[in-house]
Amino acid sequence: MLALTATEITPELLARYDRPGPRYTSYPTAVDFHDGFGPADYQRHLAAAAARERQPLAFYTHLPFCAHRCGFCGCHAIVSPHGKKVSEPYLRRLKRETEMVARRLGDRRRVTQYQWGGGTPTYLTPEQITELFGHFASLFQLEPGAEIAVEVDPRVTTIAHLGALSAMGFNRLSAGVQDLDPEVQELIGRIQPLEQTVELVTAARRLGFADGINLDLIYGLPGQRVESFAATAREVVALGADRVAIYSFAYVPWLKGHQRALPADRLPPRERKLELLMAARSVFLDAGYVGIGMDHFAKPGDELALALENGTLHRNFMGYTTRRAGDLVGLGVSAIGSIAGAYAQNHKKLSRYYVAVDGGTLPTERGYLLSEDDRIRGDVILSLMCRFDVDLDQIAPRPYFADALLKLQPLAEDGLVEIRGGRISATPLGRWFVRNVAMCFDAHLANTERRQAPTFSRTV
Ligand code: SF4
């Protein structure tokens, strides 16, 4: 699959399709959230979710603190050297918010997916990790076999952290590697020698993350070279990562001011960017990994690979997943949830998050109520992102998609998609541009494109 070389993707094709576009971890994307949706709306949706008491839930908890800022960071991270002095007040509010949400969810307490992201969750001390987890587990019931995942930074994660996480029941761990080339690490302001990652992975396997190690790479960073990025991919294979994600670097200095410090003249041009992805992709496919979507990989026996095979692969704010919990609750500053037909996002400013929680109000800053059209188009986009294929007739009568079918025509002429009746399939060539294929079904994009500053990262 996808045995293309960079020369088969012509510069003209790349120029035509490499443009700003969403990653579609939701539809519509967070850009369309608005402050007309607030705490009272969120409360109503939590009440609706509570009524489905037999269905399991997914939770995402945002732990925003980092000791240093990486130059490429696109996350909602708060850099502070103050450790407990900043994390203790945060954890107090986080626990309070969890209690508020639990009350509103009534008897609906079963959880099949629980993830800590950041920021750097291991900015917390092992004792804080134990306490925060214990608090959550006292309110919600983690189902046997639940996926309990955490993002860790190999530079600050100790054996004691891993021990605490494992003792709590965490069974999946994601660590950023980005690129092992020392020059690239220097340019992006994140020095993380291979030995550091090896130590982390070795210790994690010993301490209970036997088959739950995810490693993340990034392509499109300043100074990246195809040969050394392929070498990085080979090291990741040697480390035995169970899942790998190769994220496209989102260079958005107008949104993330600190990215202005990156040397823009060292960013790879779009042709090289694609070559970087292709080189790493070949390494993983040659090593026997299964390709998931455009840029994720899993060992053949991994749940994600099995989900792809049996058609149950799903995608939400946390990326590709095997769990399709009907509702996802976001906890913590800036966290996003998807609850009973609406998206809700918490305050992004820490001070506002604190004021809301201290006042006993749900800290919702903005959100979005899904329309029937959003659900229909969201199903199409989900199918394309997970399977590169969609049968429109299974979703709505075909005339419903007349606008999208028209937009797909040039992509069909360029050999990116095949249209057979209501069946839309991305070709091997078109899989590299799956975000562009999905964009044909996006009814919100025109509004976004009318806004002044480009909002999304580039599609390739
Ligand atoms: S550790 Fe992660 S979240 Fe923190 S600054 Fe670096 S990239 Fe951003």
Image: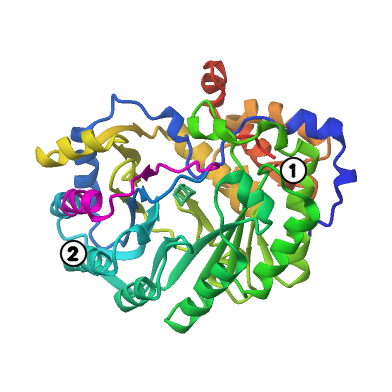
At x 69%, y 56%, the residue is 181
- Magenta stretch holds residue 3: no
Magenta stretch bounds: 71-95
At x 14%, y 49%, the residue is 100
Of the two numbered discs 2 and 1 on the same chain, state the one appearing first in sequence: 2
In the rendered image, which residue does mark 1 sit on? 273
**Residue 47 % position (x, y):** 19, 46
Q: Is residue 26 rendered to the left or right of residue 428?
A: left
Disc 1 crowd rating (10 Å Cα; few below 14, some 14-19, many 20+) is many
Q: Is residue 309 rendered to the left or right of residue 342?
A: right
**Residue 123 % position (x, y):** 34, 58
In the rendered image, which residue does mark 2 sit on? 135
At x 23%, y 55%, the residue is 84
Type of amino acid at the residue the image marks with label 2: His
Q: Circle 1 — which element?
A: helix
* Residue at the outermost bottom position: 206
Q: Nearer the viewer, residue 443 or 231?
A: 231
Disc 2 crowd rating (10 Å Cα; few below 14, some 14-19, many 20+) is some
- Magenta stretch holds residue 76: yes
